[in-house]
Structures are given as C-alpha cells and as structure tokens.
Amino acid sequence: MNAPLDKLHDFYQPAPPSWRPQTIGWYVVFAICALALLWLAVHLIRVWHENRYRRDALKELGHTEVAELSALLKRTALCAWPRQEVAALSGGAWLTFLDNATSDPLFAASPMNRIEDLALQPSLISGEDEHALRQASASWIKTHKPPRKPRRQHVSA
C-alpha cells in the first residue's frame, strides 16, 4: 500500500529576478551617466595638464634662492598670461599685477613688497621674512587666476 505522503513533491522555487533592466528608460539613464563620466574624466585630465606649470613652479620653489623668487614668479606668470602683458612689468606694476592675479593682496605688505629689491641684495632679509616670502610665493602660484583662453574659432572658407 502507498502512503499518501509519498505522492507529495517539493515546492517549486521561482527563478531569481533578472538584474537586467527591463525598460529602455534605464538604458537611456545609463548612457547619460556614462557620457557624464566621460566628460568629467576629459575635463579633469585637461585641468591637470593645464596646471602642470603650477606643479613645476612649486617644485622649483623649494630649491630656489631668495634672489630668484621674482624671476620664478615671472616665469610662472609667462606660462599663463600673454608675453606682451607680463614680460615688461617691473617694480610697482609687477607687484600690482601679482596682487590683481589673486583674490588676496599678497604682495602689498612688507616683506613681500621687497621681492624685486631682494634680487639685487638678498642679504637684506631675515629668516622669518624669507619664510613669509616663500609662503606668499607658493600661495600665489597655487591660487592665481589666469585669463580664460578663448576657444579656437573654426573659420570656413
């Protein structure tokens, strides 16, 4: 004789739900996210390349003599601004340019306003003033805002 429990079977488990999106809307969202990430990556790479001169100047600042700090800042400025705007600046005009390039007037007060005088007589500065001058120079290199370069216009002939 057969027992009635022998005719029972296990529960059927449904198939696990698919992780694949079922509607076209999700594919559109994924495509937009992928394009946004691609744009962000290209933008960050471009900014990184554009700021290479800042990284190089900061490396050079560590082993530059006090007498050469003004020249280092001038070379840094020449990387970001057109030569005709920067190359001829000296004295008060150079200090004004340095202050106008950042949001902080770094070179308005002493000892930073003597940066060009130190090129001729570097012995006129104390250790504390040299440290303050190097800090101001590093801050200027990191925070100056160069003019935006215009995009190249394609001219059709």
Image (cartoon, rainbow, N blue to C red):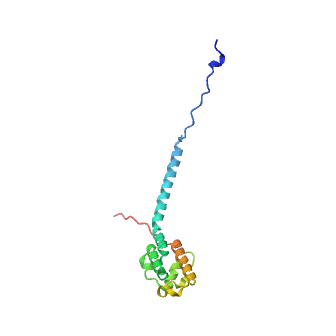
Tell which residue pokes out farthest to the left in this image: 157
Task: Name above or below for residue 7 compared with residue 14.
Answer: above
| Near-viewer residue (13 or 23) | 13
Instruction: Name the residue rendered at 46%, 63% in the picture.
Output: 46
Q: Could one spot residue 106 in this view of the protein?
A: no
User: Where is residue 3 drawn, in percent x and y?
Assistant: 65, 15
Of the 4 image quadrants, the one containing the N terminus is: top right
Query: Is 53 in front, or is 86?
Result: 53
Q: Which residue is outermost to the top?
A: 1
Percent across and percent down for residue 64 are: 47, 78
Query: Quick check: can you spot residue 90?
Result: yes
Given residues 130 and 8, the one toward you in this image is: 130
Find the residue positioned furthest to the right: 4
Residue 40, image x, y percentages: 50, 58
Q: Position of residue 58 (x, y in %)?
A: 49, 72
Q: In the figure, residue 87 lies in which quadrant? A: bottom left
Q: Residue at x 42, y 79 (%)?
A: 84
- Quadrant where the image shows the C terminus: bottom left
Image mark count: 0
